[in-house]
Image (cartoon, rainbow, N blue to C red):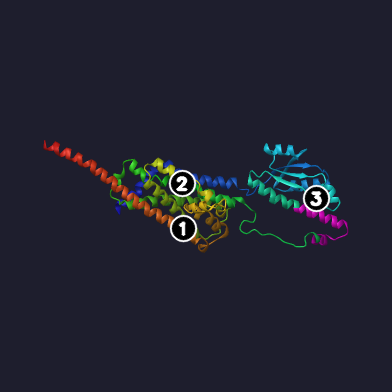
Amino acid sequence: MIAGFRMFFREWLYLLKRPRSLVLMILIPIFVTVLCGTSYEKGYFSDLKMGVVDYSYSAQTREVVEAFQQSPYFEITGYYENEELLETAMKNGEIVGCLIFPADFTKNLQQGRQAEVLLGSNAVNMSYGSTINVKGSEVLGTVSTQMAVKSLVAKGSTIDDALAKMNPVGFYTRQWYNPTNNFSYFLSFGFIIATVQQVLIYFAAISLIREKESGKLGELKGVHPIFQVIIKCLVYFIIAMGTWMACCWIMVNKFGIPMKGSPDVWLAYSSLFILSIVTLGQLFSSILPNPVFATSFSLVFTSPSLVLSGYTWPTMALTGFYQKLAQVFPLTHFALGYRNVALMGCGFEAIHQQMINLACISGGCLVLSCIIWTVRIKRIDKKEQKLQTPMEDEAAQAIAQ
């Protein structure tokens, strides 16, 4: 027991003597948290630069353009003579979207026929494309209704009758949990969680193997290999939980990201995720031959986890092979569920399967780490004994002579 406590404090002393490691484990996730909070503070795209090609220059087309100019989402940068010049401007990065009015636009309106306008976007960046399509459609729908109502009122209808004719079925939309489509709610936690994972697994993956490489395994002789693994896990678990708690506090209290889930759900779910990462790092550390290989392999192994986790792209849209591969990563069972806890206030009943999966990953990695490290220590001890035996024989012969 005393040897275990000594090893626990020895690990803390090791980190304190090398403050760069401790600072990196704590400050990198906090830095990314502040970066995400300040970068996504607005929460939506605004002032998307739009170009206009107007082959039917009239008061009606200017009314449409002015409606876009008044929207906080768009900025009309100028008019272009033709579509070729418009495309050139888009390739040069001058604009990300466009409005193209055909020559018969005004004529069709005057004759009571449907007039068409092309709403275009540079969909190389899908975020630009989706924002222009959605918000641009809203602007065009509003302008279209206003024009039609004005026409009917001019013919003698009341405004109410005109609106009823234009919109015989009234409807409204409601978006639960993120009503303003604030993408900071959508992205921030995922990036921060992925950063915590990468930093934590980097240091956890060298915690055991560095003892062998530094030749200091002898200092741990009084601690059973199983407890060596457990003590290492405990130290890095405490550091990671403290860092994650600080990151969450900053996001919620400084940048206004909601946290509707209860504290006990947050604590239990977060603890299982952090534990799964620590034990996965310990598994790599117990198997791999040296610290360089351990850190390199752990980072390569976890790098695709954010892509496969379903956080930014639904897992159901992946092929069957990648859906199964995604289950290996702890992030798959935490990032999406954690966002639901934070934004929707989900409880244990909604995330119990993810928690079971994280518990299985943690338990499996911990057991394998203990077994593999114990076997490895025994092999190291046998090699040392074989080397010591000839030396003892030579010493005995020298004394006898």
**Numbered circle sitting on residue 115:** 3
* Residue lying at the far left of the rendered structure: 401
Is residue 363 visible in the rendered structure shown here? Answer: yes
Is residue 245 visible in the rendered structure shown here? Answer: no
- 105 vs 13, left or right, is right
Q: Residues within 10 Å of mark 3 (few under 14, many from 20)?
A: some
**Numbered circle sitting on residue 357:** 1
Ranked by sequence position, the earlier of labels 1 and 2 is: 2
Ranked by sequence position, the earlier of labels 1 and 3 is: 3
Q: Against 174, is 369 above or below?
A: above
Q: Which residue is nearer to you in this view: 38 or 206?
A: 206
Q: Which residue is mark 2?
A: 301
Q: Quadrant of the N terminus?
A: bottom left
Q: Residues within 10 Å of mark 1 (few under 14, many from 20)?
A: many
| In the image, residue 377 lies in the stretch drawn in magenta | no
Find the distance from the CA under tag 1 to the CA under tag 2: 18 Å
Residue 56 x, y percent position in the rendering: 82, 44
The residue depicted at 78 percent of the width and 53 percent of the height is 144
Q: Residues within 10 Å of mark 2 (few under 14, many from 20)?
A: few
